[in-house]
Image (cartoon, rainbow, N blue to C red):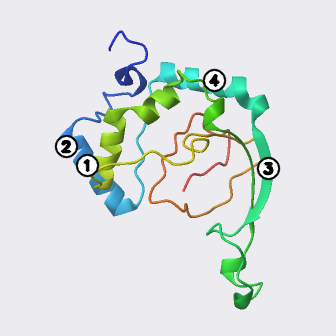
Amino acid sequence: MNTNKNCIENIINFKLNPLNNKSFITSCRQTLNRDGILILQKFITQIILDQLVAEAQEQSENAFFTKTSHNVYLTDPDPKLGKDHIYNHQIFSTKGCIAADQIPPRSSLKLLYNSVMFQKFVADVLGEKKLFEYADNLSSINVHFAKSGQELGWHFDNSSFAISLLLQAPKEGGIFE
């Protein structure tokens, strides 16, 4: 382990997720291409995970909570299809979020997001030459809060890819698909 506490090697569990290993990258790409999803178990070290949970809890009172209705495509309903058409079926999302500007500057979340090694790994797994920073500097990283009874309704993401980092597993329910 590197003695620099802000080093990427101290954030990621490299024993299970060697981001700079070609065969690991190839295996990840194959899994993603086959399944449409890649789940990396125990990606973050437990020490960092505990720190991230504590950071999130410190900011939880600043989370913006909302309840929205949407379809699975996150688009407006199409009245031409009729109210009973699956495209117009409404789902509710009730959640809270803190935006990137509410995350501490030295947070491991920001260090991971800005890590050249992590960006290269993601690009390699996706088969992209380069990734570009998310244009909305408030949404580049966000922490999602869900209290008991709240949920993020099932939906298709509107981006080419999304990275979700589970900081805490739910006590029950909470199936991530």
| Residue type indicated by callout 2 | Ser
| Residue type indicated by callout 4 | Glu
Mark 3 to mark 2 CA distance (whole Å): 42 Å
Q: Which residue is mark 4?
A: 55
Tell me which numbered mark, 3 or 2, is placed earlier along the sequence: 2
Give the SS element for disc 1. Answer: helix
Mark 1 or 3: in front is 3
Q: Residues within 10 Å of mark 4 (few under 14, many from 20)?
A: some
Camera-side residue: 119 or 144? 119
Mark 1 to mark 2 CA distance (whole Å): 6 Å
Mark 1 to mark 3 CA distance (whole Å): 38 Å
Q: Residues within 10 Å of mark 2 (few under 14, many from 20)?
A: few
Camera-side residue: 136 or 21? 136
Residue 12, how many percent across, how many down?
39, 28
Which of the 4 quarters of the picture holds residue 121?
A: top left
Tell me which numbered mark, 1 or 3, is placed earlier along the sequence: 1
Q: Residues within 10 Å of mark 3 (few under 14, many from 20)?
A: few
| Residue type indicated by callout 3 | Thr
Q: Is residue 13 left or right of residue 78?
A: left
The circle on residue 23 is 2
**Quadrant (top left, top right, bottom left, bottom right) of the N terminus:** top left
| Residue type indicated by callout 1 | Ser
Give the SS element for disc 2. Answer: helix
Please say if 108 is above or below 35: above
Q: Which residue is mark 3?
A: 66
Mark 2 or 4: in front is 4
Residue 11, how many percent across, how many down?
42, 24
Q: Which residue is mark 1?
A: 27
Please say if 166 is above or below 59: below
Mark 3 to mark 4 CA distance (whole Å): 21 Å
Which of the 4 quarters of the picture holds residue 139?
A: top right
**Quadrant (top left, top right, bottom left, bottom right) of the C terminus:** bottom right
